[in-house]
Amino acid sequence: MIERKWRQNEWQHVEQGFDAVEDEIQLAGWHRARRVGVLRRQIKDNLAVETNAGTQQGTLHFVDHSDKIKVWEYAVLVTNADYSLEALGQLYRDRANCENGFDELKNQWGWGGYTPHDLERCNLSARAVALIYDWRSWYVRLVHPKTHLEAITSRPLLLNGVARLMTRHAGQSRLLLTLTHEVGDQIKTMINNIRKGLDFIRANAPQLPKVEKSIIGTNY
């Protein structure tokens, strides 16, 4: 089907750099044909391909592609909805984003695999993990407001410094932070974003008592 649509060249541009085309297909075991949306996007990064030339160990090499030789990735979405192709692709991306959050909670935060038979302790552990995940997600969103940063990538960046208390005066503590990561300049920018974000919250949250606003200011 993708090959047939390629020859017909009826692709239309949709969001996120994708082209899309619509068709119907009926697979074995289906009672009727169903609507499908075929999405394609050009791959601009290098691709690694493994070949096996009669040996047990495969050979890994990179595919050289340019503007003359285009490489595409495809997604075929089966649906019974009447949404436009542009909306259909965005709905599936939103669904994937929701599933990524649960995947992160289970595989990076340990939100699963509770073995005690005491349901109350399992509930307490699950709620604690969810609360900490929510706090940290909010915290790293200050670091990079445009996209969500997962723990597997943000932890090595934001937990790779050594802080030393320098002075305490008038209820304020001054810390000297020494970064040991190779992208120290990038991390400094992230920390500065956190400070600006918390200052903005303190300035625009008049409903908070003075004590709680002071806690927000000292905890970063």
Image (tube, rainbow, N blue to C red):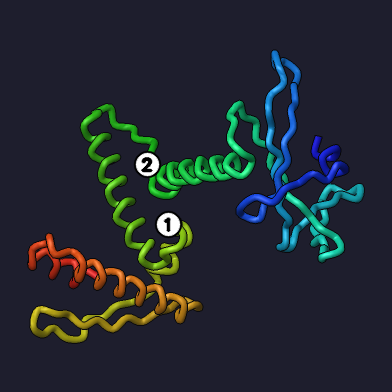
**Would residue 150 be found to the left or right of residue 51 on screen?**
left
The amino acid on which the numbered mark 2 sits, given as a three-letter code, is Trp
Q: Looking at the rendering, which quadrant does residue 84 occupy?
A: top right
Q: Which mark is residue 31?
A: none
In the shown orientation, is residue 152 left or right of residue 16? left
Amino acid type of the residue tagged 1 in the rendering: Ala
Q: Nearer the viewer, residue 160 or 78?
A: 78
Does the CB distance between marks 2 and 1 fall below 8 Å?
Answer: no
For label 2, the SS is: loop
For the C terminus, the image quarter is: bottom left
Residue identified by numbered label 2: 111
Identify the image quadrant of residue 207: bottom left
Q: Residues within 10 Å of mark 2 (few under 14, many from 20)?
A: some
| Along the line of sight, the residue nearer the viewer: 172 or 79 | 79
Say whether residue 98 is left or right of residue 39.
left
Q: Which mark is residue 151?
A: 1
Please provide percent x and percent y for residue 123.
25, 35
Q: Position of residue 158 (x, y in %)?
A: 39, 68
